Amino acid sequence: MQNTSHAVMSQRSEPSDSPDDFPTPPWATRALIEHVIGRETVSGMSCLEPACGRGYMSRPLSEYFARVTSADAFHYGYAPIKDFLIFPYGVETHDWVVTNPPFRLAEEFVSRAISIAKFGVAILARTVFLESVGRYHSIFKENPPDIFAQFTERVPMVKGRVDPKASTATGYAWFVWNKSRRSNSSRLAWVPPCRRELERPGDYD
């Protein structure tokens, strides 16, 4: 019999051609702005969400950014189909790139996003993304995130939908690169308990 405990299921492994469709609860995106980078930082700016799925991250981003451009490599009916890793986005054509990328492609997403963003990049990823010798050499050694913001609450993500009753054993964090920074070190931060404060009617429609 399959072990379906949350601790085991959180260690999912998606096939190489999977869309890795685990939508972000909107409150977790609002937490980035409200508790990590600040409303004033993004006010009047543009944002690219290149792995938008059904728009669960794009919609809350539009509450803060002046303009949000959305796309995805797969068809979900929300935005145009554009594969972020091959579509010819220009250098520094968007102020920010904010997304929850497929975990197996997160490293490539970071590298590409840093060239496309003029001011900053924010990637929502499992906390274990901080690990790995490969990522240390390819990203973190020369270009560590400006902020590593760990969620103190769990951010439940369910395949193919958002679910207010879901739970998870997986930890998530925001990895933020501020391109104007002068330091080569990272700041550890915590996203405080904020789910109740940041959930809105219609988030789970």
Image (cartoon, grey):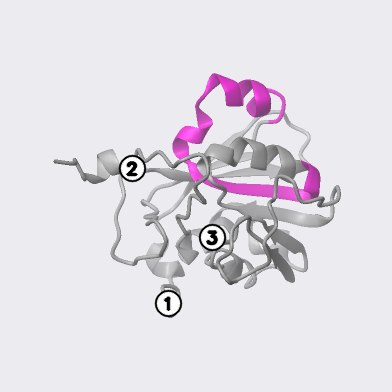
Q: Residue at x 26, y 39 (%)?
A: 8
Point out the frontmost of discs 2 and 3: 2
Q: Closer to the camera, 121 or 84?
A: 84
Does the magenta segment cover residue 136? yes
Q: Residue at x 70, y 45 (%)?
A: 85
Q: Which residue is mark 1?
A: 205
Mark 2 vs 3, N-terminal side: 2
Q: Can you tell which mark lies on residue 115?
A: none
- Could you tell me residue 139's position as x and y percent? 66, 29
Amino acid at circle 2: Ser
Amino acid at circle 3: Thr
- Mark 1 and 2 residues: CB-CB less than 8 Å, in contact? no
- Mark 1 and 3 residues: CB-CB less than 8 Å, in contact? no
Q: Secondary structure at mark 2?
A: loop
The answer to whether 78 appears left or right of 12 in the picture is right
Q: Which residue is mark 3?
A: 29
Separation (CA) of disc 2 from disc 3: 20 Å
Q: Can you tell which mark lies on residue 10?
A: 2
Q: Secondary structure at mark 1?
A: loop
Point out the frontmost of discs 1 and 3: 1
Q: Residue at x 25, y 46 (%)?
A: 6
- Could you tell me residue 20's position as x and y percent? 48, 49
Q: Which residues are magenta?
A: 115-143
Q: Quadrant of residue 197?
A: bottom left
Separation (CA) of disc 1 from disc 3: 16 Å
